[in-house]
Amino acid sequence: MELKVFESPEEVARAAAQHFVELCRDAVARNNGFAVALSGGSTPKLLYALLADPKEPFRDQIAWKKTFFLFTDERNVPPDHPDSNYRMAHEAMFAHAPRTTVARISGEKPADQAAEEYEHFLGDMFEETPDLDLIFLGLGEDGHTASLFPHSPALKETERLVVAPWVEKLNAYRITLTLPVLNNANSVVFLVTGTSKAAVLREVNSPNKNPDLYPAQAISPTNGAVSWLVDKAAARLCSHNNSSNTGADNDLLNKNP
């Protein structure tokens, strides 16, 4: 696992935006469409704002009408709730971008129902296991990603596309894509910033793998690529052998063997 290390969260977001633009162009040329799943949390908010900012170069390079936005996971809350991943993405990007297609998870419904409906939606959209062009993921301080938390039964799911696990530490349900979907993408990009993520990033970056304890270690696309875009603050405890300082114009794709 190689980390691409940038000076600041802003540079991480800019590198991710460039990657988004390049994959969008290639997917539209190949399939006349671009399917991307967005993560929640504070780290990707900078990215979403960059993509929609008319003062930035990315907005005009995106085929918005041919881009289909989905979500990796959602809280069990209405779309106008402060904790809603959809609300964050809407306020940061969708409200300022040209018209596009957005498929949100119905977090206002009972969690099991929301998961089942989103799964049916994905099944109608894709003939087989969804092969999304791009998935953005974050890293929680406990090693979770999407809403796959440590020791969750959802980590063992091999058939369902979307599930609604109970998260004991949060005393709440979450709705999340499962590993069969996350590991079937063309490109998976982790965005990790801040000193609070340094300790867990070191553990996830360790050669000793324990995905039940650190679910982010379970992300290994079958035929695609995984990238870790991190800032110096998050990477400060990681081995220099597993990280490289880089710029936004460098190759971001680290092909799995």
Image (cartoon, rainbow, N blue to C red):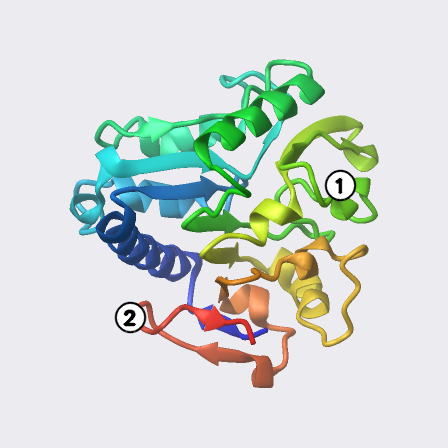
SS label for mark 1: helix
Residue 47: x %, y % from top left: 38, 48
Residue 96: x %, y % from top left: 26, 30
Residue 65: x %, y % from top left: 23, 33
Q: Is 28 positioned to the left or the right of 105 in the image? A: left
Q: Which residue does the numbered mark 1 point to in the structure image?
A: 154
Relative depth, front residue between 112 and 214: 112
Q: In this view, does 251 lie above or below 81?
A: below
- Name the residue furthest top: 109
Question: Can residue 55 be seen at all in this image of the molecule?
Answer: yes
SS label for mark 2: loop
Going by the numbered disc 2, the residue's amino acid type is Asp
Name which quarter of the figure residue 90 lies in: top left
- Name the residue furthest front: 127
Going by the numbered disc 1, the residue's amino acid type is Ala
Q: Is 124 positioned to the left or the right of 235 in the image? A: left
Label 2: how many residues lie within 10 Å, few (<14), some (14-19) or many (20+)?
few
Relative depth, front residue between 165 and 26: 26
Counting residues from the start of the chain, the first of labels 1 and 2 encountered is 1
Name which quarter of the figure residue 249 lies in: bottom left
Q: Is 63 positioned to the left or the right of 224 in the image? A: left
Relative depth, front residue between 213 and 248: 213
Label 1: how many residues lie within 10 Å, few (<14), some (14-19) or many (20+)?
many
Q: Is residue 89 above or below residue 196?
A: above
The residues tagged by marks 1 and 2 sit, at their Cα atoms, a distance apart of 36 Å
**Residue 38 numbered mark, or none:** none
Q: Is residue 133 above or below residue 172?
A: below
Relative depth, front residue between 43 and 51: 51
Q: Which residue does the numbered mark 2 point to in the structure image?
A: 249
